Image: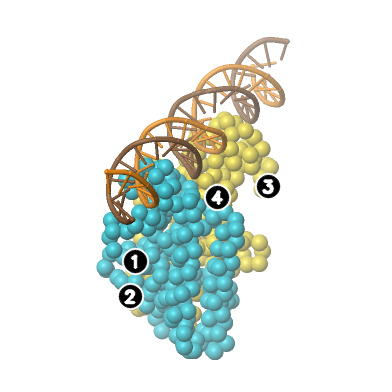
Chain colours: A cyan, B yellow, C brown, D orange
Amino acid sequence: MSIETLSRKDQINQVAQNLFREKGYSATSMRDLAKAIGIEAASLYSHIKSKEELLQNICFRIAAEFFDEYDRVQNGTTDPKLRFRHAVTAHTRVVASNLDASSVFFNEWRHLNEPSLSEFKAQRAAYEDRFKNLLREGIEAGVFRKVQVSFAMRLVFSTLNGIPTWYRNDGALSPDQIAEQIADFLLEGLLKK
Amino acid sequence: MSIETLSRKDQINQVAQNLFREKGYSATSMRDLAKAIGIEAASLYSHIKSKEELLQNICFRIAAEFFDEYDRVQNGTTDPKLRFRHAVTAHTRVVASNLDASSVFFNEWRHLNEPSLSEFKAQRAAYEDRFKNLLREGIEAGVFRKVQVSFAMRLVFSTLNGIPTWYRNDGALSPDQIAEQIADFLLEGLLKK
DNA sequence: TATCTTTGCTAACGAACGTTAGTTTAAGCA
DNA sequence: TGCTTAAACTAACGTTCGTTAGCAAAGATA
């Protein structure tokens, strides 16, 4: 779907995602946003309520995608290693398919105001807990090394959430391909067996 | 060294590091900074040239630390696995010992203007190349799996540069301790052998 | 004591900020 | 054709921004 065929409201959201990612939320003015679309700043308010509403839309839409995709791939799987692998690849696919939005999700959430900010943190913590449980399961099953669960979870998310800093969805590597390679990397490490 | 004993200039730089990290560079005003110190915004300009100078100081000081620490630990080491391990632990120590500054280095560098911006990117690329070479050496020596070098380098840095998002230097785990654990994680992965 | 330097102050500059009010334009529909 | 509505416009609001000018206080130096 090209950007011209979107409704103006969707178009605003899409351009906002891109600008918030490239320049940061605070450094992006409503005049920047309007200019990128080709209208006046004041005209934006025929479609949106406020600048912060744009940030909220991005953050909570992507949060929902993380949960949805997680639930979809976990459904029915019991093997701890496979459960972890599916969680990692699902997360990676969401990030790699939504580079602008996930970048904003990772880096600009702190500009949310209450009560959105607390709601955001709660959702993120709930999502992180799922990964901690997967790691615990793997350790208890004797499949994973005895790592500290919350420490390992942090390292896993650091790896995954850094994806927008380097990945370009330009055809060289598909989201599915990097998802598998990242899962390999996290599970196997760098050393040859 | 407590913050009261610093020269005013050093104090400004230190508080700026902290505010730029917590709120972001753009969302931090010179009035915020002055208030945190207890003077008027205009008084800052008796000590500094501009807001951007503060950002430059942070970014290039920490860049120099990365290079210095890297050179220090590589000196004399030839074993590829050990060279990689030393590079990772050195980088981790610099990050973990400079959480505010490294956070700004990772997230706020894009607000640099030219020519500082290009200089920053060049230094970062040179530093990343060192890690790529270490990975290449390890693969050629048959110690590392045959991963794509620049892909693996990106994953390594994602892991390392995410440290400020979760690590608190509060005595529970020292910078040296997490450095070793992160090196283990990158080399061994999650799976039990 | 007289002078210089450092470090702070108040006041203010012009620019940019997010947003609102009121109006115009143009398309869809009765 | 006349009416309604959506979506744009111009103008402006009050606020905040980084920064400068000019001055005052205080300590160091002569």
Query: What SS does tag 4 mark?
Result: helix
Q: Earlier in the sequence, mark 1 or mark 3?
A: 3
Image location (x, y in percent) of residue B9 = 59, 38
3 vs 2, front mark: 2
Residue placed under numbered mark 3 in the picture: B2
Q: CA distance from mark 3 to mark 2?
A: 50 Å
Three-letter amino acid code at the position of disc 4:
Lys
Residue placed under numbered mark 4 in the picture: B23
Residue placed under numbered mark 1 in the picture: B150
A65 vs A134, nearest the viewer: A65
Q: Are marks 3 and 2 on the same chain?
A: no
Three-letter amino acid code at the position of disc 2:
Gln
Going 37% across and 42% down the picture, which residue do you hit?
A40
Going 49% across and 54% down the picture, which residue do you hit?
A53
Image location (x, y in percent) of residue B22 = 57, 52
Residue B141 in view: no
Query: What SS does tag 1 mark?
Result: helix
Three-letter amino acid code at the position of disc 1:
Ser
Three-letter amino acid code at the position of disc 3:
Ser
Residue placed under numbered mark 2 in the picture: A177
B180 vs C29, nearest the viewer: C29
Query: What SS does tag 3 mark?
Result: loop
Q: Check disc 3: other Cα within 10 Å, few if <14, some if 14-19, many if 20+.
A: few
